[in-house]
């Protein structure tokens, strides 16, 4: 619990200090924002800062900082360091600079920003990639909450239909209607869940593995997890540390801000809040799996079905290991019902359910906005919004039908989504780095995390059995070599850009 407590304190200190460093480097000013200059009553609307913060937090959170943190802690206490340092120096900086860049460019999306700073070819590729990601996320976050809600009351397909109808409203209506009014309430529900289970952690004060107990990979020896700590940990915990998905959501709120000076608490602050969510659930995972907390929160009848197998791992009578039997959603429902009672568990589960529902709705809306930007179509009329929403909904329904009919197949595809999120993070950080370099600002702020995330996504793509599945050591060497080539390419561009500026400056003086 000491590592958990120190990590929480570190996130607060990180916000108080490093967020001001990022703000000073970017330099927000009093220029007119897109919400004022391009107000259209649909996507560009000034909202109160507290409401924007709540929507931003819920949009970027989803179930990522919950499920990802639970699975990330399977690697051991090193997850604490990734959440803390990744969030402060990587994820929050990523969210702040990319959100402020969107604010400076009329609230445009990630693909358009990429076109400005990395070229039209990368822009076109990112449009297709981001559209696919948004529709995958939207379809996935229809079915998952429907499963949880059907366990409480009603039929699964009933909830699927209701959630999808809700998505239609959030995609089509002006942002201050469904999203502006409903999301803050859902955000409060999720925050209640985090505060409630976090308070129970402090009240119980269990003996948990600490950072100084070892940073090596605990997965194989303790839980039978057959993945290397690097790069798997850094892809498993995306939301809560660094996530490129956030850069697709921030433009929605950049179109609702009245002042650039609201950026630090909204973009950087929402990411720090998400990091706290990840820390809470990572610690609960540590309690559940490493401190044998599962024995305390499960019924005696269920506990008796587990024994130590010949390989030294605790397994269920059907042969499944702990992490196979207790997946992330099962850990959440088990902990909430055991620690918070009936009323508390219902409220907590509503927070868990609200997160994916709102993230899914925002994903479909983001897909519509990406289409409108790429095609140059205004979205002020209901007809124009319907024109772009119909193909998005059609693809979403097709993906949803495929998921329901082939759940294991979609589960395989979803593993690519986690990697895709980190790929978008690497691209976003390079966009931010090029911007800072062009503006003669301290570009190391984003260059260092950009290089790290480039190494992560390359290594995972080469090593993971879901992609190329190549031998580990040659893959790491190859990923490092390509990352160094990317750095060399940036240095070459920076040198030539500075030389070009110097020539232009001399010509102007003449």
Image: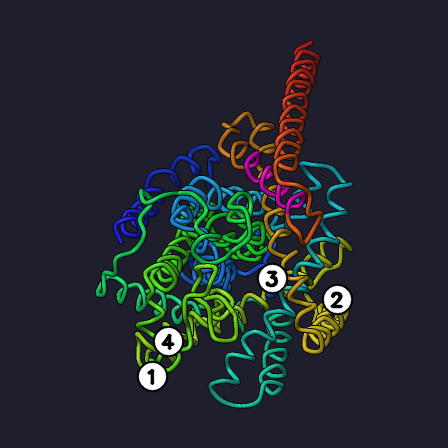
Q: Residues within 10 Å of mark 2 (few under 14, many from 20)?
A: many
Q: Distance between the residues labelled 4 and 1?
A: 22 Å
Say above or below: 475 vs 102: above
Residue 339 position, x and y percent, is 30, 74
Helix, strand or loop status at disc 3:
loop
Instruction: Count neighbours of disc 1 (C-alpha within 10 A) and say few if under 14, some if 14 to 19, many if 20 or more.
Output: few
The part of the image, by quadrant, that contains residue 178 is bottom right
Determine which residue is flagged by label 2. Answer: 388
Q: Do the residues labelled 4 and 2 touch (CB within 8 Å)?
A: no
Q: Which of 307 and 426 is in front in this view?
A: 307
Mark linked to residue 342? 1
Q: Distance between the residues labelled 4 and 3?
A: 52 Å
Q: Mark 4 points at which residue?
A: 303
Quick one: SS at disc 2?
A: helix
Question: Is residue 444 positioned above or below 114 on the image?
Answer: above
Sequence order check, earlier mark of 4 and 1: 4
Q: Where is residue 439 in the image (x, y as percent from the top left)?
A: 57, 28
Q: Which of marks 4 and 2 is in front?
A: 4
> What segment carries the magenta color?
450-463
Residue at position x 63%, y 78% from top?
164
Q: Gap in Å between the C-alphas at discs 2 and 3?
A: 14 Å
Q: Can you see residue 88? A: yes
Between circles 4 and 1, the one closer to the viewer is: 4
Residue drawn at (67%, 11%) of the image: 506
The residue positioned farthest toward the front in the image shown: 310
Q: Say what secondary structure mark 4 lies in.
A: helix
**Which residue in the protein does label 3 denote?**
43
Indicate whether 300 appears above or below 234: below
């Amino acid at each position: 619990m000491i590592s958990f407590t120190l990590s929480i304190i570190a996130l607060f200190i990180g916000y108080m200090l490093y967020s001001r460093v990022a703000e000073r480097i970017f330099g927000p000013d009093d220029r007119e924002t897109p919400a004022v200059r391009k107000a259209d009553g649909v996507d560009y609307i000034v909202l109160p800062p507290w409401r924007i913060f709540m929507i931003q937090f819920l949009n970027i959170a989803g179930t990522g900082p919950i499920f990802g943190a639970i699975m990330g802690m399977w690697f051991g206490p090193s997850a604490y360091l990734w959440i803390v340092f990744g969030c402060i120096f990587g994820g929050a900086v990523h969210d702040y600079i990319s959100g402020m860049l969107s604010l400076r460019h009329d609230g445009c999306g990630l693909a358009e920003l990429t076109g400005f700073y990395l070229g039209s070819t990368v822009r076109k590729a990112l449009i297709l990639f981001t559209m696919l990601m948004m529709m995958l996320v939207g379809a996935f976050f229809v079915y998952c909450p429907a499963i949880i809600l059907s366990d409480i009351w009603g039929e699964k397909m009933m909830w699927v239909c209701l959630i999808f109808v809700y998505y239609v409203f959030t995609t089509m209506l002006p942002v201050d209607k469904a999203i502006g009014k409903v999301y803050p309430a859902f955000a409060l529900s999720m925050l209640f869940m985090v505060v409630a289970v976090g308070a129970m952690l402090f009240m119980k004060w269990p003996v948990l593995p600490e950072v100084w107990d070892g940073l090596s990979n605990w997965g194989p020896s303790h839980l039978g997890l057959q993945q290397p700590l690097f790069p798997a940990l850094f892809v498993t915990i995306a939301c809560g540390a660094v996530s490129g998905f956030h850069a697709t959501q921030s433009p929605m709120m950049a179109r609702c801000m009245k002042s650039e000076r609201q950026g630090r608490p909204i973009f950087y602050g929402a990411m720090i809040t998400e990091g706290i969510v990840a820390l809470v659930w990572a610690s609960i995972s540590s309690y559940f799996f490493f401190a044998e907390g599962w024995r305390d929160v499960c019924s005696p009848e269920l506990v008796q079905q587990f024994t130590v197998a010949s390989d030294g791992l605790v397994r269920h009578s059907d042969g499944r290991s702990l992490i196979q039997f207790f997946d992330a959603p099962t850990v959440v429902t088990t902990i909430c019902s055991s620690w918070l009672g009936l009323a508390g568990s219902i409220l907590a589960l509503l927070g868990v359910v609200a997160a994916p529902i709102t993230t899914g709705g925002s994903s479909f809306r983001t897909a519509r906005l990406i289409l409108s930007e790429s095609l140059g179509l205004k979205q002020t009329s209901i007809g124009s919004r319907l024109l772009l929403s119909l193909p998005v909904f059609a693809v979403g329904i097709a993906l949803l039908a495929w998921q329901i009919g082939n759940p294991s197949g979609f589960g395989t595809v979803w593993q690519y989504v986690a990697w895709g999120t980190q790929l978008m993070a690497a691209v976003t950080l390079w966009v931010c780095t090029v911007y800072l370099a062009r503006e003669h600002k301290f570009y190391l702020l984003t260059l260092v995390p950009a290089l790290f995330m480039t190494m992560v996504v390359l290594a995972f793509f080469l090593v993971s059995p879901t992609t190329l599945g190549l031998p580990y050591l040659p893959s790491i060497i190859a990923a490092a070599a390509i990352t160094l080539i990317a750095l060399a390419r940036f240095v070459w561009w920076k040198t030539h850009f500075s030389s070009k500026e110097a020539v232009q400056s001399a010509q102007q003086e003449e």
